[in-house]
Amino acid sequence: MPRESFLQGDCAMISGMSQVHCQTLLCHDIVKSAPAYSLLAGTLAAVAFLAIIFLLEHSRRSAGEGPRTVDLENVVVSLISAFLNLIVATFLYAALSGEEFLTARAATMGFMAAIAISIAVLNLLYGVVWLFEAWELEEAASVTATIAGLVAPCVTFVFIGLRALDMLALAHGSHEDRSWFGWLLASLLVGLILCFSLSARAESARALVQDTARRMGVKFFAFGAIALGVLTIIGAAIVSQLHTSYSFPNWLAAFIATAVFGVFASYSYLIRAIQRQTPTTKPVETARALVPR
């Protein structure tokens, strides 16, 4: 009899542990996986740093030859911004790995770290598109622009959304309380796809707007990405000092998701501005070169 009670107690304890440790959407413990994310971000930061060194060395050796200097400068600016944001993401995930348990506070820090690493990845891809554009690899630039402008924003937005849903689930202790937020994320994801599709078909847009987006887009996205990285560090520093049950309120989580959608939609347009400019400017330059003087 005591043995049966002991076995029943073990079963109840195991069942209770499974319920405690499976409070997120995919039963994913962001605290345990934080070291892997930190290692990934650090590796990508090293890749971005090596690419910057390579481009600077190549520009020094081939002065006046090869790709246009302005396009290479755009690549370097994008890679520098990506490098800094990847360093931020590495720090945030390293700080998250120091949490002892999967709590609402840990999920909130994971939500902010997801925003930081997503922005860094998009910035890295933005530099890759500019690199193919600088080397006049039109087919590679076209395919990479589609991946960077459509696939990457959608995947990273879903990644951020999952972290937000886990945060709300741990805060409220229920999966039902976050159903409205899931519908909001789904609507924003559909809107993100529509923004890319509309920007791809808007070939009749004014050339002045396209040229402005092409020239100013690099600085705009670089400074914006660095600003978001600084905000995530400040937010993580504040949240880490609060109680373990703290999480962002529902309205703030919805506001952040909507703001991320706005940034990603602008990013998709900046990617399309690079791609649209390629077939429109080069024939004009070629025609001018053929006109006899």
Image: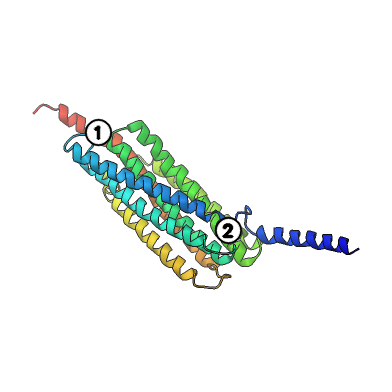
- Of residue 10 and residue 12, the one placed in the foreground of this image is 10
Q: As drawn, which residue projects farthest toward the front?
A: 3
Depth check: give the residue in front, 23 or 160.
23
Label number found at residue 268: none
Q: Is residue 110 above or below residue 270?
A: below
Q: Could you tell me if residue 269 is visible in this image? A: no
Which is nearer the eye, 272 or 90?
90
Image x and y of residue 13, in percent: 76, 62
Judged left or right of residue 246, residue 50 is left
Residue type highlighted by circle 2: Leu
Residue annotated with mark 1: 282
Residue sitting at the far left: 293
Secondary structure of the residue carrying tag 1 is helix
Q: Quadrant of residue 168?
A: bottom right
Q: Is residue 32 above or below residue 152?
A: below
Who is closer to the viewer here, 212 or 53? 53
Question: Which residue does the image show at 32% across and 32% down from the upper left?
Answer: 137
Residue 245 at x, y percent in the picture: 58, 70
How are the residues colored?
rainbow
For this view, does 248 lie left or right of residue 141? Answer: right
Q: Is the residue marked by circle 2 packed among few (<14), some (14-19), or many (20+) residues within 10 Å?
A: many
The location of residue 123, given as percent across then percent down, is 37, 49
Measured from the top left, where is residue 166 in percent x and y? 58, 59
The residue that appears at 35% across and 36% down in the rendered structure is: 141
**Residue at horizontal 30 percent and vertical 45 percent from the top:** 52
Circle number at residue 165: 2
